[in-house]
Structures are given as structure tokens and as C-alpha cells.
């Protein structure tokens, strides 16, 4: 091989290594961006959840809670609607495979805990009469009620 051939080979190897390094750097950046987006998404939903639950009456988790006779019925129902809308969005994102499994399991456990309580069951009984989330989501919510029974 001549010096010119060695220089050409070295140039080709350097170019190839440069492309590999660039591809790895792009892959790392995309992973970091996806992680940041997932974290931001989780933070946004967590903030919305917190804003909703902070508006609930203090005694909402009590077994003796009766929604229909509660003095803040309208306000509580407005927050319940917001809660079920949030649950639907989370469920829908999971159905479309747009959520990390661990995040979905956290949210699912929270839904299951909430839907085991009388106040949420009472609210769902009313909300499903006048709101259409679709059969699949309604069956999903009903499955929690069946587990609790």
C-alpha cells in the first residue's frame, strides 16, 4: 500500500468513527429528552391530581361520607368530574402504550384506592349517567367496584 492508500484508509476510518460517535451522541440525547418529557408529563399530572384532591372535603375518605347530603355537593362533584377526567386521560394514555409501566402502576394503584371509597363510588354512579367516557373505560372503573364488593 502506498502512503496515499494509508491516508485514504485512515480518513475513511476516521469518518466512520465520527459517524458512530455522532450516532451514539444523538441516541443518548434522544434518551435524555424522552426521560425529561416523561418526568415533565408525570409532574404535570401529579400537579393536576394534587390540585383536585386539595379541593375535596376533609372527610371525603370516611366510610360514612354521603355525597348527596354533603353541604359542598356541587363543588365536590365538580372536583369529582375533574378527577374522573384525569383518570380517563391516564387510562387512555396507558391504552395507547404512551406511559411507562411503573408510572401507570402508580396511577392505577391510586385509582384503585380512591374507587374503593364510598364518596368516589357515589360520584361515579352519578357521573356515568351524564358523561360518556366510552364503554371500555366505564368497564375499567366498574372493575374496581367489583373488586371492592
Image (cartoon, grey):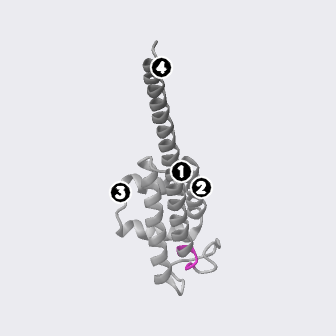
Bounds of the magenta segment: 52-56
Q: CA–CA distance between discs 1 and 2?
A: 22 Å
The residue mark sitting in front, 4 or 2, is: 4
The residue drawn where x is 58% and y is 64% is 114
Contact (Cβ within 8 Å) of mark 1 with mark 4: no
Q: Which percent across, then down, holds residue 46?
A: 55, 66
- Disc 2, SS: helix
Q: Which percent across, then down, holds residue 37?
A: 49, 57
Q: Main secondary structure of the magenta part?
A: loop
Q: Which percent across, then down, holds residue 59?
A: 63, 78
First in sequence: mark 3 vs mark 2: 2
Q: Is residue 10 above or below residue 92?
A: above
First in sequence: mark 3 vs mark 4: 4
> In this figure, which residue is indicated by the disc labeled 1?
32
Closer-to-camera residue (105/141):
105
- Disc 4, SS: helix
The residue drawn where x is 45% and y is 28% is 11
> In this figure, which residue is indicated by the disc labeled 4?
6
> In this figure, which residue is indicated by the disc labeled 3?
134
The residue drawn where x is 45% and y is 14% is 2
The residue mark sitting in front, 1 or 2, is: 1
First in sequence: mark 1 vs mark 2: 1
First in sequence: mark 1 vs mark 4: 4
Q: Is residue 16 above or below residue 77?
A: above
Q: Is there any visible trace of residue 47 in the rendered image?
A: yes
Q: Which percent across, then down, holds residue 16?
A: 46, 29
Can you name the residue that lies furthest to the front here?
3
The residue mark sitting in front, 3 or 4, is: 4
> In this figure, which residue is indicated by the disc labeled 2?
106
First in sequence: mark 1 vs mark 3: 1
Q: Is residue 106 above or below residue 4?
A: below
The residue drawn where x is 50% and y is 79% is 76
Amino acid at each position: 500500500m502506498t502512503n496515499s492508500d494509508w491516508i485514504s484508509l485512515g480518513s475513511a476510518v476516521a469518518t466512520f468513527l465520527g459517524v458512530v460517535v455522532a450516532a451514539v451522541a444523538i441516541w443518548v440525547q434522544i434518551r435524555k429528552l424522552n426521560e425529561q418529557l416523561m418526568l415533565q408529563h408525570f409532574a404535570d399530572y401529579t400537579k393536576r391530581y394534587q390540585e383536585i384532591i386539595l379541593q375535596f372535603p376533609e372527610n371525603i375518605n370516611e366510610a360514612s361520607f354521603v355525597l348527596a347530603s354533603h353541604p359542598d355537593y356541587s363543588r365536590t362533584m365538580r372536583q369529582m368530574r375533574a378527577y374522573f377526567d384525569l383518570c380517563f386521560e391516564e387510562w387512555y394514555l396507558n391504552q395507547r402504550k404512551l406511559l411507562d409501566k411503573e408510572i401507570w402502576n402508580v396511577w392505577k394503584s391510586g385509582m384503585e384506592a380512591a374507587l374503593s371509597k364510598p364518596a368516589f363510588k357515589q360520584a361515579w354512579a352519578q357521573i356515568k349517567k351524564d358523561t360518556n367516557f366510552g364503554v371500555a373505560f366505564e368497564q375499567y372503573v366498574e372493575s374496581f367496584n367489583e373488586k371492592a364488593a
